[in-house]
Image (cartoon, rainbow, N blue to C red):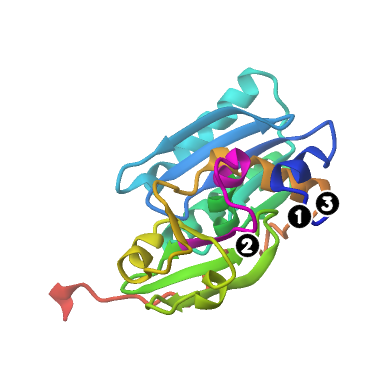
Amino acid sequence: MGENCNFADKIEDIFTKMPCILHIETSTKTCSAALSQDGQVVYHQSDTTSNGTDNCGVLVSEALSFADSHAIPLDAVAVSEGPGSYTGLRVGTSTAKGVCYGRRVPLISVSTLKLLCTPVLLQDDGLEEGALLVPMSDARRMEVYAAVYDRALRTVRDVRPDIVGRDSYAEYLERGPVYFLGNGAEKCKQVICHPNARFIDGIVPSARYMCPLAEMEYARKNFRDVAYFEPFYLKDFVAIKPKKLL
């Protein structure tokens, strides 16, 4: 595939007959579930309340009921693997595994940071030539989990925790336009003033955009071990005692 091939072209080149996949996204407070068939999202539901992951089971159950009522056979389950909320990722992964066991279908994991880029790349509306994308997940204080991708979603820099400062991502900003997105990008707005810095607001990970990424993994038969798969936390979970007990 040529250097100038964009993300949408990669999706079209996979194969014509695409599977039915259940998508589960719980990496933030917003929980969502979707069904895709033949490359199209046929069902989507989300809970944007502060405790959205509490309703993950309900959303997934309703998505499965939709598939069953429309005689759509399920081929796989895709789950957002992180980085993101520890509790949310655990809930999503546990739910996805339960469906895989119950329906006897394979498990697919999708990078949450790549997922953040998907709606931007599919629309490709106004992205400048040679632009890089830096999706970010909030990691509290001035820290974010971030990666750097090009417009074909090829990895320029792997996922890692970053402390946001004035010179963060300077090496990429000197090359050309850099688009920051995700719930961690707000921190960059406050400190990064480079003329090549661009900020895209309102991008949140959603199950409805997992379809192209999951279908690529399905085509490659890149399935995860249902028994041993763990989300990509990036950091170990540290439990904090409630103030009442201190």
Residue in front for this viewpoint, 82 or 121: 121
Residue that mark 2 sits on: 149
Query: Alpha carbon of mark 3 to alpha carbon of mark 1: how far?
Result: 8 Å
- Which is in the foreground here, disc 1 or disc 2? 2
Question: Quick one: which residue is furthest to the top in this view?
Answer: 70
Determine whether, in the image, residue 98 is placed left or right of residue 5. Answer: left
- Name the residue type under label 2: Tyr
| Mark sitting earlier along the chain (1/2) | 2
- 56 up-or-down from 245: above or below: above
Q: Are marks 3 and 2 in contact (CB under 8 Å)?
A: no
> What number is the disc on residue 220?
3
- Which is in the foreground here, disc 3 or disc 1? 3
Query: Alpha carbon of mark 1 to alpha carbon of mark 2: how far?
Result: 23 Å
Q: Residue at x 40, y 48 (%)?
A: 53
Residue in front for this viewpoint, 46 or 192: 192
Residue that mark 1 sits on: 223
Residue 196 coordinates in the image, percent (x, y): 48, 64
Residue in front for this viewpoint, 141 or 187: 187
> What number is the disc on residue 110?
none
Q: Residue at x 49, y 49 (%)?
A: 205
**Is residue 81 something that shows in the picture?**
no
Residue 1 coordinates in the image, percent (x, y): 86, 52
Determine whether, in the image, residue 117 is placed left or right of residue 213. Answer: left
Q: Is mark 2 on a helix, strand or loop?
A: strand
Q: Which residue is drawn at 65% across and 54% down?
A: 151
Residue interval drawn in magenta: 119-136
Determine whether, in the image, residue 58 is placed left or right of residue 65. Answer: left
